[in-house]
Image (cartoon, rainbow, N blue to C red):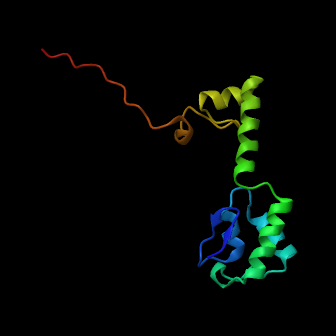
């Protein structure tokens, strides 16, 4: 099993897709890593040679911010936005969408599940 940057890559997926399981590496980054390492993107993760894994690991370690450091950088950036009290920081603090989406309807993922409001009691005669 290929283990890169502390992540076990899925065995039956193509290496091109498997590398995207690492936080901080998307499809474009994955493709450029494989070109630099001279590894075919069509090879399955379980069929990788040890030399291929070490080449990929070396490229990722030297050229990319992944996993813990990438998460840390992201959280520091969000804290900075909150601290300077800009619009995006306030939206982060309130748990609302940041990029201009409507909130009157939708935005359930960000706002949370709908809370039911008690209705009026019916007047009985």
* Residue at the image position 29 percent from the left and 19 percent from the top: 120
Q: What is the x, y in percent for residue 26?
A: 73, 61
Give the tally of numbered discs: 0
Q: Quadrant of residue 45?
A: bottom right
Q: Position of residue 119 (x, y in %)?
A: 31, 23
The residue nearer to you, when weighing 80 against 86, is 80
Is residue 68 positioned above or below 31 on the image? above
The residue at the point 59 percent across, 77 percent down is: 11
Picture quadrant of residue 91:
top right
Which is nearer the eye, 67 or 83? 67
Q: Quadrant of the N terminus?
A: bottom right
x and y percentages locating residue 80 in the rendered image: 76, 30
Residue 49 position (above or below residue 100): below
- Residue 35 placement: quadrant: bottom right
Q: Is residue 99 left or right of residue 96?
A: right
Q: Compared with residue 47, is residue 25 higher up or lower down, i.e. above or below?
A: above
Classify the position of the C terminus by image quarter. top left
Residue 53 image offset from top left, x and y in percent = 74, 76
Residue at the left extreme, as displayed: 125
In the image, is 57 to the left or to the right of 116?
right
């Amino acid at each position: 099993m290929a283990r890169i940057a502390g992540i076990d890559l899925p065995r039956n997926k193509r290496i091109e897709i498997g590398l995207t399981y690492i936080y901080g590496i998307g499809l474009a980054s994955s493709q450029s890593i494989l070109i630099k390492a001279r590894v075919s993107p069509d090879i399955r993760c379980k069929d990788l040679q040890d030399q291929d894994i070490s080449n990929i690991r070396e490229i990722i370690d030297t050229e990319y911010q992944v996993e813990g450091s990438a998460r840390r950088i992201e959280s520091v950036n969000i804290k900075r936005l909150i601290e300077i009290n800009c619009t995006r920081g306030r939206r982060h603090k309130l748990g609302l969408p940041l990029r201009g989406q409507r909130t009157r309807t939708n935005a359930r993922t960000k706002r949370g599940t709908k809370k039911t409001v008690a209705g009026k009691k019916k007047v009985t005669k």
